[in-house]
Image (cartoon, rainbow, N blue to C red):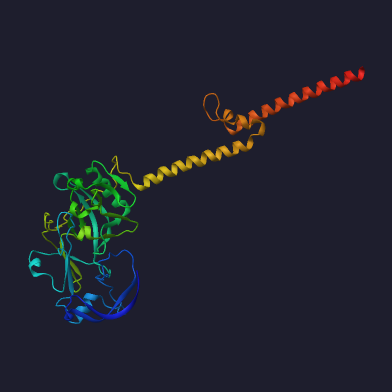
Amino acid sequence: MKGEFVRDSVCMTADNRSCATDFRWIAVTHEGGLGETTDGIIGLMRGFEGLGELEPLYVPYAYGQGLLDKNSFSVFLTTARKEVDLSGESYIDFGSPNPTIVQQGVTWLPAVNKDPWWTSYMQGIQIGDGDSSISFALNRAPALTDTGASAISGPKKEIEAIFGYLTRYLDDYNKDRYWGPLFSCSRRDYLPNIYLAYGGYWFQVRPADYVVPVNWDEGVCALMFERSNDNYWILGNSFMRGYYITHDYEKKMQGFVPLQEQGLKKKERPRRVTVMPEEVFEVPQTEGYVEDWVWWTIASVILTVIFVVVGVTVPLCTDMDAASSNNFWDRWFNSSGRINTKKQVKASNSSELQHIENLLKQALEKKQVEEGSNEIQ
């Protein structure tokens, strides 16, 4: 994305009274990845503390101009489904959150101090419900919510472990280099709920949240988890769906309220983590799903074997003379099928040379005898 800084009025609605005047923003001149119906991106990060030279973000700026009654915004993202028209179901509230929703009870998470994003810490994961569930500890790492990301992105090793456990619930799937496991969308309802220990609470992530179709017509679906080489998590739409999430700049907190979605069971209210799991989360030993590093290891072993064979073959070839080159494979394998060593081949060559030398001596002696006989005559 490329652009240039400009100042203009930026409006939340078609009403001029909602416009923040003289706001500094970036006019995009070149972009890639945005859909045709997308006009641009509005930055809703928490912002950098103690850096007064930076321009204020849109919500604090609009609040400072008296356009908002509260320095906050709230978003609600619903789950896309082919069979349900969800036009207008997702929305954003600028200013005070919807009081009717807030009355249902808000789970507040404090944002990490001096972090520019809406960030708390990820500490654990639970797969499944009830007695059949399994829980693991994750390496404590920062995790931020981001409406601009579709998937749940995390450290590669732990995302691979999630793939490993979830594919146990699939009868058949294909592994794609980009998407990971691809499978029939009809298997979505067989997959388990996942719970992430985030900010000291267990947050539910339903199959309807983390399974998305990559091909509607053929009914092919994927798991919306993305591997990263960084030691932090990005909780995108797959995590945020089904929650009404308030971002309060004054309190420096995020508030979560589950809302009912059309055609889906309402998400559970986040429950406080009382005991953190101790078992480390690792890729399960199971048939089927194989990590990328396994394939790389196999390829490395094969290449190593090739190099060793070539390394042995080349010296052997250079040691063999032209007279014996036609019998190379006879020397390479002996009668028992074992490979002859370089020393053995050299010995074989020396024996043949000795034999040839003897034949030459015999021929020379015979010639001398014949010449001597002629002289006598």
Image quarter of residue 352? top right
Q: In which quadrant is the C terminus drawn?
A: top right
Q: Is residue 320 above or below residue 148?
A: above
Query: Is residue 326 visible from the viewing direction of this image?
Result: yes
Q: Please state the horizontal and vertical placement of residue 107, each as a whole percent of the image.
A: 14, 63
The number of numbered badges drawn on the structure is 0
Q: Taking 305 as reference, is 350 left or right?
A: right
Q: Please state the horizontal and vertical placement of residue 30, each as a whole percent of the image.
A: 35, 70
100 or 78: which is nearer to us?
78
Q: Please state the horizontal and vertical placement of residue 72, each as a whole percent of the image.
A: 18, 73
350 or 260: which is nearer to us?
260
Q: In which quadrant is the N terminus drawn?
A: bottom left
Q: Is residue 63 above or below residue 85?
A: below
Query: Is residue 280 visible from the viewing direction of this image?
Result: no
- Most extreme residue toward the top is 377
Q: Is residue 180 above or below residue 243?
A: above
Image quarter of residue 150? bottom left
Q: Please state the horizontal and vertical placement of residue 209, each as a whole percent of the image.
A: 19, 55
Residue at the spot 67% in from the left edge and 31% down from the top edge:
323
Residue at the spot 9% in from the left edge and 64% down from the top edge:
105
